[in-house]
């Protein structure tokens, strides 16, 4: 187990270094001058050069990269060009909202997908199975930027059940979570169905049925438990996707998370904050997938021994 953990740790460190470097380079290749955006078009060349020197933007790119890496190791993400606040404080104020939305979306997806996929597998080629697959197709096909406004129109403006936007209690979380979790539930339902169909044909399932166990007990205690590994892998991958893909949903529902902060910072040309937001989303994705990989290896010894 230690060698498995060590190999994954080395891999994730290499990936994190690559992510940091790519994010740094992409931000510096974006058209536009942040110094010009801060001071305005009427600024003199002397003022522009003085601010570049203050921000360290006049130094060679490799020097800026090294200073950025050392700053990250010390927990220093720099300062916002717009508000002058430490970026780490801005992120810590916004990230809990994004994490809350992603967790709620994942919960909605599991709540829909597990029963839907299980029924589809148990009633293969029936109307239940076909209905579940139609739902999966619709869930994957409908984009968030269409589903979100439709939910607002129906449940907020017409029925008045939920708030239109903002983060104000549990009710305000329902519509964004459904918007974010619908596509994942469609993917997950297909995975549950496919995995269960494979497991239900195993010998130990036939043995359990021969012993007279109830079908519900067979599915819950035997089939789903053994089908959990690939399902857990998909969940881990999709949780990282939810953390990054919540941008559109946060904009639609004015949810004060990292996604909305990213768009606001792009509009203000606040490049250090944009860089920090992209880096946080990327690292969250990498860390969630690494954690899923470790859990997978802990649950299935064959994965560890193959390293």
Image (cartoon, rainbow, N blue to C red):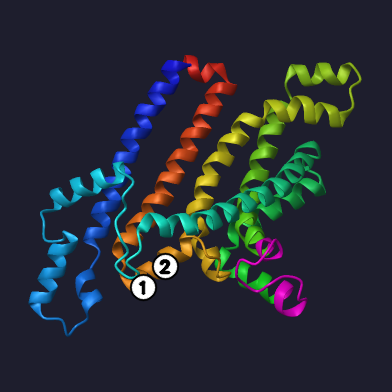
Disc 2 crowd, CA 10 A, few/some/many (<14, 14-19, 20+): some
Whether tag 2 and tag 1 are in contact, CB under 8 A, the answer is: yes
Outermost residue toward the bottom?
Answer: 42
Quarter occupied by residue 60: bottom left
Apparent side of residue 254 relative to residue 267 in the rendered image (left or right): right
Up-down relation of residue 62 to residue 4 (above or below): below
Quarter occupied by residue 59: bottom left
Residue under label 1, please give it: 267
Q: Secondary structure at mark 2?
A: helix
Identified at 37% across, 67% down, the residue is 265
Q: Is residue 43 visible?
A: yes
Residue under label 2, please give it: 263
Up-down relation of residue 302 to residue 41 (above or below): above
- Quick one: 74 or 211, which is closer to the camera? 74
Q: Quadrant of the C terminus?
A: top left
Decide whether residue 109 is among the magenta residues: no
Magenta residues span 154-174
Identified at 86% across, 21% down, the residue is 209
Apparent side of residue 274 relative to residue 129 in the rendered image (left or right): left
Picture coordinates of residue 108, whole percent (x, y): 68, 51
Q: Secondary structure at mark 1?
A: helix
Picture coordinates of residue 112, whole percent (x, y): 72, 49
């Amino acid at each position: 187990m230690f060698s498995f953990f060590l190999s994954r740790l080395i891999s994730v460190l290499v990936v994190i270094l690559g992510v940091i470097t790519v994010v740094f380079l992409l931000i510096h290749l974006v058209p536009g001058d942040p110094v010009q955006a801060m001071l305005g078009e009427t600024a003199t060349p002397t003022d522009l050069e003085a601010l570049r020197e203050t921000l360290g933007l006049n130094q060679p790119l490799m020097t800026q990269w090294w200073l950025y890496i050392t700053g990250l190791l010390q927990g220093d993400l720099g300062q916002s060009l717009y508000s002058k606040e430490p970026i780490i404080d801005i992120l810590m104020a916004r990230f809990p909202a994004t994490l809350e939305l992603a967790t709620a979306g994942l919960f909605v997806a599991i709540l829909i997908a597990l029963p839907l996929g299980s029924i589809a597998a148990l009633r293969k080629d029936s109307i239940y199975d076909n209905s579940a697959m139609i739902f999966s197709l619709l869930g994957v096909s409908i984009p968030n930027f269409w589903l979100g406004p439709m939910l607002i129109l129906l449940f907020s403006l017409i029925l008045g059940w939920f708030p239109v936007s903002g983060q104000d209690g549990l009710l305000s979380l329902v519509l964004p979570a459904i918007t974010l979790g619908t596509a994942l539930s469609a993917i997950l339902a297909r995975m549950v169905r496919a995995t269960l169909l494979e497991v239900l044909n195993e010998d130990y399932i036939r043995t359990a049925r021969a012993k007279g166990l109830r079908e519900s007990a067979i599915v819950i205690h035997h089939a789903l438990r053994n089908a959990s590994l690939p399902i857990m892998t998909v969940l881990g991958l999709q949780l990282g996707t939810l953390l990054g893909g919540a941008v559109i949903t946060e904009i639609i529902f004015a949810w004060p998370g990292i996604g909305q902060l990213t768009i606001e910072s792009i509009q203000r040309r606040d490049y250090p904050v944009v860089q920090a937001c992209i880096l946080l989303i990327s690292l969250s994705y990498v860390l969630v997938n690494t954690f899923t990989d470790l859990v997978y290896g802990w649950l299935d010894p064959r994965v560890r021994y193959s390293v």
